[in-house]
Amino acid sequence: GAVVSQHPSRVICKSGTSVKIECRSLDFQATTMFWYRQFPKQSLMLMATSNEGSKATYEQGVEKDKFLINHASLTLSTLTVTSAHPEDSSFYICSARDDIAGNTGELFFGEGSRLTVL
Amino acid sequence: AQSVTQPDIHITVSEGASLELRCNYSYGATPYLFWYVQSPGQGLQLLLKYFSGDTLVQGIKGFEAEFKRSQSSFNLRKPSVHWSDAAEYFCAVAGSGYALNFGKGTSLLVTP
């Protein structure tokens, strides 16, 4: 099946620093990828839709200047948490839609990245 | 907007007993529905999906789900639960642009 790889799986950083999380589709092309955030014991909340070659679309309430998304190729999207603060500590999960699979609606998820900001 | 509701936050079942996790959706047309499972600290694994056709969908690990339009439901079932099934279960519906909208999840505890 289609595989989505996220890196790093865990990251700890100091408050005020920036952290980059990568999301790669390993065996398929993904024009569209999605970034979700999950707080402990809560559901996944969509943060933004990442589109290859164009600007990301952010959900209401998500600061685009804080969560920078770059989708430079058909297999890679990156999420950069800028000037991270403890309240940004969360589990970030990316997902990707296979361009060739058609309009099935199925998304493939990465393993997630746990960010801890001290 | 497309949304799903999972009424049960926690469910406890005995190993070997049957399981049903509830999911109700809100969507005008025929929805694309999914069930995912998440173990602690892990990503999501797709159990099964419904797009159209047969309303009883078979998934992995012995799970099945039935789409009932009249009840706006897509409940997940398993005839006999194993201890390894303990996890968080999420129902989801495809929204605009193919992003998935997730329910709040149901935490399954399996007792010996």
Image: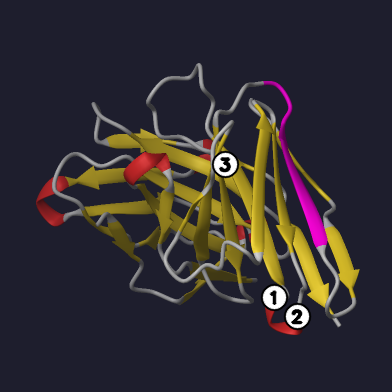
Question: Is A22 contained in the magenta span?
Answer: yes
Give, as a three-letter code, the residue at label 1.
Asp
Residue A18, x across and y down, in percent? 82, 65
- Per the image, label 1 sits on a secondary structure element best described as helix
Report the predominant secondary structure element of the magenta stretch: strand
The reply, left or right, for residue B25 in relation to residue B91 is left
Q: Same chain for marks 1 and 3? A: no
Q: Which residue is mark 2?
A: A85
Is label 1 or label 3 in front? 1
Q: CA distance from mark 1 to mark 2?
A: 5 Å
Q: Which mark is drawn over residue B61?
A: 3
Residue A71, by quadrant, is top right
Residue at point 48%, 19% (across, down): A101
Res. B26 image quadrant: bottom left
Q: Callout 3, which amino acid?
A: Lys
Q: Quadrant of the C terminus of chain A?
A: bottom right
Label 1 and label 2 in one chain: yes
Which residue corresponds to mark 1?
A88
